[in-house]
Amino acid sequence: MKISIYPGSFDPITYGHIDIIERASKISDKLVVAVLNNPEKKSLFTADERCEMIKDAIKQYENIEVESFDGLLVDYAKKKNASIIIRGLRAVTDFEYELQLAQTNRQIYDKVDTVFLLTNIQYSYLSSSIVKQVAKENGDISKFVTQFVAKKLLEKNGNN
Ligand code: ADP
């Protein structure tokens, strides 16, 4: 069974992430969307809230699991019996960091390979931080995130 992990902050999940999730689920028997729970990395949403928003977005898929993790990604991959780490690439600017991350993970644990999926061109500009900025200024974010996420962002900003 081919198990893949798609790790990230997902603070919050955007249509760019969802596109990667849909495509990764097709090339895996099972896909684990893994939400990084790192108290040192400041996030708007708690890990539980981030998982809840992902679960809502992917409920029609049967081979996807959503979970939060802490510690080393490769340790988590071992625990989940995963052989593939999925990452999305938007632009050349993502590449250097992603390469470093993938090489490091492979040095630590060589039974896992990182597979990069290129962003759908439609979402190549999209990031969680841009969405948070637009939401903070009460801009229309309906093209970037699901209705459920948009509602959660409104609540966070005290505009419900
Ligand atoms: P991290 O803090 O791990 O970068 P993110 O939630 O920002 O967490 O991103 C998780 C993964 O999703 C990364 O591989 C990132 O490049 C990818 N990603 C983020 N936004 C998009 C997008 N719009 N299209 C494709 N991939 C994306």
Image (tube, helix red, strand yellow):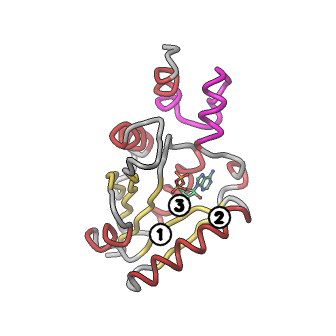
Q: Nearer the viewer, residue 5 or 30?
A: 5
Q: Horizontal placement of 52 versus 119: left or right?
A: left
Residue 94 placement: quadrant: bottom right
Identify which amino acid the numbered label 3 is placed on. Answer: Arg
Q: Residue furthest left?
A: 79
* Location of mark 3 (residue): 23
Could you tell me which quadrant the N terminus lies in? bottom left
Q: Position of residue 107 (x, y in %)?
A: 45, 84
User: In terms of secondary structure, where does tag 1 sit?
Assistant: loop
Q: Residues within 10 Å of mark 1 (few under 14, many from 20)?
A: few
Start-end of magenta stretch? 129-150
Q: Position of residue 144 (x, y in %)?
A: 62, 37
Q: Residue furthest front?
A: 40
Q: Position of residue 6 (x, y in %)?
A: 45, 61
User: In terms of secondary structure, where does tag 3 sit?
Assistant: helix
The first of marks 2 and 3 along the sequence is 3
Q: Horizontal placement of 68 versus 45: left or right?
A: left
- For ligand 1, tell me if the residue under mark 2 lies within 8 Å: yes
Q: Residues within 10 Å of mark 2 (few under 14, many from 20)?
A: few
* Location of mark 2 (residue): 118
Q: Residue at x 43, y 74 (%)?
A: 84
Q: Residue at x 66, y 25 (%)?
A: 140
Q: Quadrant of ligand 1?
A: bottom right
Q: Horizontal placement of 113 versus 63: left or right?
A: right
User: In terms of secondary structure, where does tag 2 sit?
Assistant: strand
Identify which amino acid the numbered label 1 is placed on. Answer: Ile
* Location of mark 1 (residue): 27
Identify which amino acid the numbered label 2 is placed on. Answer: Leu
Above or below, 82 relative to 62 = below
Q: Real-space Cα distance between discs 3 and 1?
A: 7 Å
